[in-house]
Amino acid sequence: MVEHGISATHAVVTMDAALPGIIWGWMITLNMWAKSVGTGVVLIGAYLLYRHKKEEMPNLRWMMPLLSFIFLNIFLLFTLTDLHQPYRMINIFLHPNWTSAITVGAWMASLFTGLITLMMVIGGLDAFPDVARHNSLAKTAREHSDLYEKVFPFVVFLAIPVTLYTAIIMAESSARELWQAPTELMQMLLAAFMAGSAALILVSDAWSKEARQDLALILSMAVFFSFMMYMGEYFFSFKSAEAEATLEYVHSGGEYNVQMLPLS
C-alpha cells in the first residue's frame, strides 16, 4: 500500500534526544511566583480580616489590592512574553475553547485582575482623600466606596481557581511528567500562602502584634508543608521508567539539580 512508502508513517518516538537548553528558565519561575503573590495576598488578607478588626491593620484595605495588582500584571506580562506568538493570545477571548484549562484560566485571571483594579482604585482613594480631590472619576469612586466590600467576596472566590489552574495545565502536558503529581494542586496553594504572607509581612509595621503573629504562623506552616511535599515528590517513586530515569539523573547532580528547587 501507499502508506508503507511514506517515511512519516514509520516515525519512532525516542527519549534520547538532547534538550535544547533550559526548558523552564527564570521567566517561568518568576511568572509562577508573581501569580502566587497576586492571589496569595488576597487569600491571606481575607483570612486576616476575618480574624482581626480592620483597625488592627490600617493599610491592608489599599495595600492588599495594590500588591495583588502589581504582581498579577507581572504574571500576565511574562505569560505573554513567554508565548512564541503573543498576539495570538487575543484568540482566547475572541474564539474561546472552553474545554481548555488555558482558556478558562485566562478568562478567570483577567476577570480577577479587573476586580482587583476596582478595589485598588477605591481603596487607594479612600486612604488618601487629598489625591485627585477635584477629579470627577475619583469623586465617583469615592461615592461608591461600598463596592469594595461587595466585590471582595467574589475576588476571594476567584483567587482559588486562579491559583490552582496552572497545576491543571501541567497535568495536561504529557511531556512534563515530573510536574503531574496529584500533590501539585496543594503545592500551588501552599506557594500562594507562602508568597502572600511574606509580601504582607513587609507592609505590616503598623499592624497589631496578633495580626503579625498570624502572618508569621501562616508563613512558617506553608514553608514546612511545602518542603515536606517537595521532598516526597523528589525522592519517592513516580512508577514511571522515564520519570525515574530523569530523577536519577537530577539526584546525581545533573543539570536540573539546583533548578528544581525554586520550581517546587
Image (tube, rainbow, N blue to C red):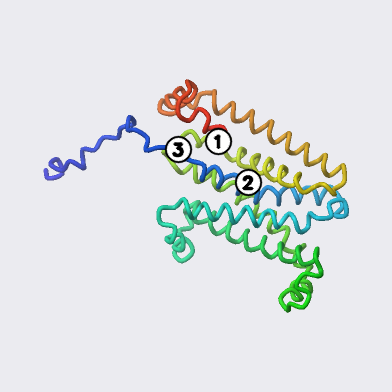
The answer to whether mark 1 and mark 2 are in CB contact below 8 A is no
Query: Residue beneath label 1, please?
Result: 182
Q: Position of residue 22 (x, y in %)?
A: 44, 37
Q: Which quadrant, please, contains the C terminus? A: top right
Residue reaching furthest to the top: 252
Q: Residues within 10 Å of mark 3 (few under 14, many from 20)?
A: few
Disc 3 residue type (three-letter) = Arg
Instruction: In the rendered view, tell whether residue 49 sits above or below residue 254.
Output: below
* Distance in Å between CA atoms under marks 3 and 2: 20 Å
SS class, disc 2: helix
Q: Nearer the viewer, mark 1 or mark 3?
A: 3
Query: Residue beneath label 3, please?
Result: 176
Q: Residues within 10 Å of mark 1 (few under 14, many from 20)?
A: few
Query: Residue beneath label 2, please?
Result: 36
SS class, disc 1: loop
Q: Is residue 7 left or right of residue 131?
A: left
Q: Is residue 197 left or right of residue 110?
A: right
